[in-house]
Image: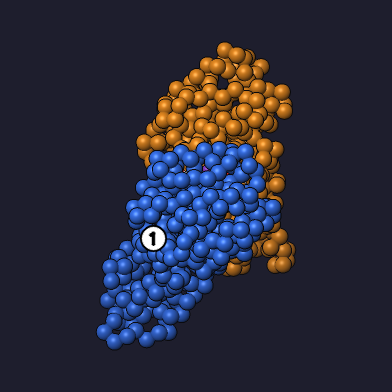
């Protein structure tokens, strides 16, 4: 049977591999520990089989983290629409992860499925933010609810929801300003947007290139605002996708989409098998 | 040295075990090295770099005779500090504006903070008595020009750009012409990554047209193990002269930037500590090393 000594070296290699794929250190340790517990004491026929056993145990441990049951955004949208209500989606995350671009992509994606979105320009803070989202709305022919720079983002989100309800639009996409999870004022402002607009789906938008900070971001946003799902952007930038594991482990909610480039069509529904392959490639 | 003092005090309890020892204990050194390893990996320093560094520290600590009058503990701390400083490469010199026009090219991954940092650098240069001009060559990001316009107009900085023009090379040429009598010209570029061949090719060409006197790579403080590979692709397109780390106001430690230093040989000159234009500081190696070591 397998002893701890038998697997020590392999487990160390494994841990390094996870770390190099940008899985946060605390999450890597959890995965390796779980693999170890799975293996030690197991009876195997030949010692040369160990690697195969490890690989299977690893795959299982990782799947447990990144393959989380839950409804897709499309399913949620269909449900809401059948009740005659819009699906209200709010995108949050730290600075520059791709929230605004993702709203353009999601609009395009659901327009193609026959739905009519409305966008709330609730980033009233960053230079050029309103103009940026206005460009997307214009290009895609989507109604944009906006006020002037510096105005109350919660009020804009509220107006967008009212607009969708009055006009029978099916999807509300709320763009929020990027914020550091350590910035208490801005985290409070985000909570207010949530209170006022009552989103059905709060989506954490994370950058696939993020390193160890991914867990801290996920933890703090989740504590502040209860995340319902995750979108990982810039997955085209050759990342190994470890951030998916870090964020998934903390939030324990499904990953909805992956951002795969800068154009509207560069988005795909999340696929756990694809992600596993990335991590183990 | 203040740094040595705080290293000794803060590095964890294992460090304390070194205190009062007259000869260096192999086991304790290994423990200390392991602590350093953990801290650096959690700070996003490249894994291979960390493994190499910890081996060097261990070897030196076990094999080098401490100088006379130095305790084993001080000896180990000095070695750690020296090796960390080594990772930072050559010392950062102040931006020296020694030519007219002095052309600065900003580059980096999508969303890393280039445009915001240009606003910050403009403010910094204004305080030093310069009035830089800015050229927008980002034809990708919607409202890239608007963003720069809003950032620069408060400071009354001259800006060239044309949202209708989708040719970055043409924009660079026209900007150069328009500002040829200015003392400093700063070029903003679209974000890009190493797998976007067209954009990397565009960066090559921009470099040839602009012939920058200083190319500045902006590294997102939250980036992980990809930092080195990405920096390498940028350094093949232009000669990187300095690095700025953005977003150090959060909880990320910014160790990814060390891989960029290793790949480009360029020093870190400034850090960004917030979204506002004045949240910008000269790089402080001691503070950065403390941050990386989790102190
Ligand atoms: N390669 C790539 N780039 C992306 C992707 N998603 C977004 N980007 C780029 O990342 C940059 C930042 O995107 P934004 O949508 O402005 O990010 P944001 O989160 O809204 O930023 P803030 O509002 O400033 O916090 C832009 O240059 C986008 O084109 C992606 O999936 N792949
Ligand atoms: N908290 C914080 N945010 C920052 C810092 N520097 C930049 N940002 C924010 O990061 C986001 C992206 O900044 P940009 O300046 O648009 O980045 P960019 O590299 O020009 O982006 P692209 O042109 O799309 O590639 C914005 O929300 C900025 O306000 C910083 O030091 N701290
Ligand atoms: K951005
Ligand atoms: Mg945005
Ligand atoms: Mg920019």
Task: Report whether residue A35 is seen.
Answer: no
Q: Secondary structure at mark 1?
A: loop
Q: Position of residue A58 (x, y in %)?
A: 64, 54
Location of residue A13 by image quarter: bottom right
Coloring scheme used: by chain
Residue beneath the point at 42% across and 27% down: A151
Residue under the image location 58 percent in, 50 percent down = B174
Query: Which chain is rendered blue in the image?
Result: B
Chain in orange in the render: A
The correct choice, above or below, for B54 with respect to B213 in the image is: below
Q: Judge left or right: residue B179 versus residue B172.
A: left
Query: Is B87 drawn above or below residue B169 in the view shown?
Result: below
Mark 1 lies on residue? B283
Which residue is most to the top? Answer: A166
Nearer to me, A11 or A200: A200
Identify the residue at horizontal 40%, vertical 40% (top origin): B154
Q: Position of residue A24 (x, y in %)?
A: 52, 53
- Placement of the C terminus of chain A among the 4 image quadrants: bottom right
- Of A250 and A268, nearer the camera is A268
Q: For the N terminus of chain A, which image quadrant?
A: bottom right
């Amino acid at each position: 049977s397998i002893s701890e000594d038998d697997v020590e070296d392999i487990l160390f290699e494994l841990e390094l591999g996870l770390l190099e794929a940008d899985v946060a250190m605390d999450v890597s340790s959890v995965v390796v520990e779980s693999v170890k517990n799975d293996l030690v004491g197991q009876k195997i026929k030949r010692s040369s089989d160990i690697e195969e056993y490890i690989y299977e145990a690893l795959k299982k441990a990782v799947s447990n983290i990144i393959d989380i049951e839950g409804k897709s955004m499309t399913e949620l949208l269909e449900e809401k629409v059948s009740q005659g209500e819009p699906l209200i989606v709010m995108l949050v995350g730290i600075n520059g992860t791709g929230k605004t671009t993702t709203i353009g992509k999601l609009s395009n994606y659901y327009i193609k499925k026959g739905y009519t979105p409305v966008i709330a320009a609730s980033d009233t803070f960053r230079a050029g933010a309103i103009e940026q989202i206005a460009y997307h709305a214009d290009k895609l022919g989507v109604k944009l609810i906006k006020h002037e720079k510096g105005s109350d983002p919660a009020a804009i989100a509220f107006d967008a929801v009212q607009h969708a309800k009055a006009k029978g639009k099916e999807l509300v996409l709320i763009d929020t300003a990027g914020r550091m999870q350590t910035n208490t004022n801005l985290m409070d402002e985000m909570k207010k947007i949530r209170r006022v607009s009552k989103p059905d789906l709060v989506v954490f938008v994370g950058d696939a290139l993020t390193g160890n900070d991914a867990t801290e971001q996920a933890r703090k946003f989740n504590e502040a605002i209860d995340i319902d799902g995750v979108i990982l952007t810039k997955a085209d930038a050759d990342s190994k996708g470890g951030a998916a594991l870090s964020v998934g482990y903390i939030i324990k909610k499904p990953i909805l989409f992956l951002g795969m480039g800068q154009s509207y069509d560069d988005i795909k529904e999340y696929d756990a098998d694809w992600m596993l392959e990335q991590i183990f490639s | 040295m203040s740094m040595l003092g705080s290293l000794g005090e803060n590095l964890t309890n294992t460090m304390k075990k070194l205190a009062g020892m007259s000869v260096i204990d192999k086991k304790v050194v290994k423990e200390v090295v392991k602590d350093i390893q953990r801290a650096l990996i959690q700070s996003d320093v490249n894994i291979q770099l960390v493994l190499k560094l910890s081996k060097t520290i261990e070897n030196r600590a076990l094999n080098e005779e401490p100088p006379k009058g130095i305790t084993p503990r001080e000896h180990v701390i000095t070695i750690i500090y020296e090796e960390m400083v080594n990772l930072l490469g050559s010392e950062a010199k102040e931006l020296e504006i020694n030519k007219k026009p002095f052309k600065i090219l900003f580059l980096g991954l999508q969303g890393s903070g280039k445009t915001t940092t240009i606003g910050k650098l403009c403010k910094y240069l204004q305080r030093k008595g310069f009035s830089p001009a800015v050229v927008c060559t980002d034809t990708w990001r919607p409202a890239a020009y608007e963003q720069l316009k809003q950032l620069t107009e408060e400071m009354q900085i001259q800006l060239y750009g044309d949202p209708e023009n989708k040719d970055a090379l043409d924009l660079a040429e026209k900007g150069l012409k328009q500002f040829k009598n200015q003392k400093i010209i700063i070029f903003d570029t679209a974000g890009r990554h190493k797998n976007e061949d067209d954009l990397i090719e565009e960066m090559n060409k921009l470099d040839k047209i602009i012939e920058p006197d200083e190319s500045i790579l902006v590294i997102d403080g939250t980036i992980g193990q990809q930092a080195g590979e990405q920096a390498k692709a940028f350094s093949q397109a232009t000669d990187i002269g300095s690095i700025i780390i953005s977003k150090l106001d959060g909880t990320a430690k910014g160790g990814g930037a060390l891989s960029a230093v290793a790949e480009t040989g360029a020093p870190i000159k400034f850090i960004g500590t917030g979204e506002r234009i004045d949240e910008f500081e000269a790089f402080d190696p001691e503070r950065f090393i403390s941050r990386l070591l989790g102190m």
